[in-house]
Image: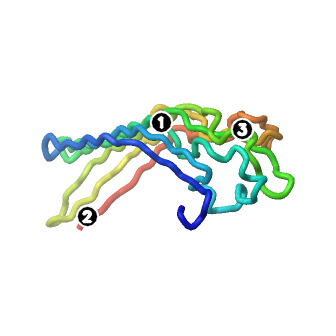
Amino acid sequence: MANLPGLVRDYSGFVLDFESRFTDWFHVLASYTNSESEGNVGYTQNAGVDFDIYPDHFENTYGYLSDHRRHRVKVNGFVDLPLDFGLAVEGFWSSAGVYAPTEASETYGRIFTERRGSREANDRYGMDLQVSKGFRFWRDMRFELIGAVFNVLNDEQVTTVCTRVEGCAGGLELDAASAYVQPRRFEAGIRFEF
């Protein structure tokens, strides 16, 4: 950020990783992250100049950024079962995300009406599963049937809220949910190895 004076991004945190292969047929990868992301320019601002005009867009700009979530936990793993079956799982949890209300600027774009990241949204969590069955044929050729379930818990959590003081499309008021996680869904596939 040295070529853009006055713009600051401060990220601090630590990560604990755990990875294990108890045997060739069982693998677990897990991590915990504790972090803090503050600043006055976010990673999302490279797509526009909504907060770039001085002095309008420099009020309330320093605070928690959109990628700030104090705690994150991720778990991934798979088990190779007898008869060439496989089971894989992916799960995560993260503490509340942050946002701040904005309103239209008199000159251009939007301005923060409160300190950036002053409001908390909801925690996020989810789990996906995959089951597979392999079949071997002719020399070393193999094909695999794969079934996956996304959002196993079928919890349609809020992913975005209306941050506009004047409200959002569809008659949504400030702080109202505007987007959700997709409901439980299924996928099937085939993989060939040769």
Viewer-side residue, 145 vs 185: 185
Residue 75 x %, y %:
34, 39
As helix, strand or loop, the secondary structure at mark 1 comes to: loop
The residue that mark 2 highlights is 193
Residue 23 vs 139, above or below: the answer is: above
- Residue type at mark 2 is Glu
- Residue type at mark 1 is Arg
Residue drawn at x 51%, y 35% as measured from the top left: 124
Residue 171 vs 58, above or below: the answer is: above
- Residue type at mark 3 is Glu
Disc 3 versus disc 2: distance between alpha carbons?
Answer: 56 Å
The residue that mark 3 highlights is 114
Residue at the farthest right position? 106
Residue drawn at x 44%, y 35% as measured from the top left: 71
Viewer-side residue, 83 vs 154: 154
Tell me the quarter of the image containing the N terminus: bottom right
Residue 97 x %, y %:
56, 37
Residue drawn at x 78%, y 37% as measured from the top left: 172
Mark 2 nearby-residue class (10 Å; few <14, some 14–19, many ≥20)? few
Viewer-side residue, 81 vs 176: 176
Mark 3 nearby-residue class (10 Å; few <14, some 14–19, many ≥20)? some
Task: Tell which tag, 2 or 1, sits nearer the viewer.
Answer: 1
Residue drawn at x 35%, y 44% as measured from the top left: 130
Disc 2 versus disc 1: distance between alpha carbons?
Answer: 42 Å
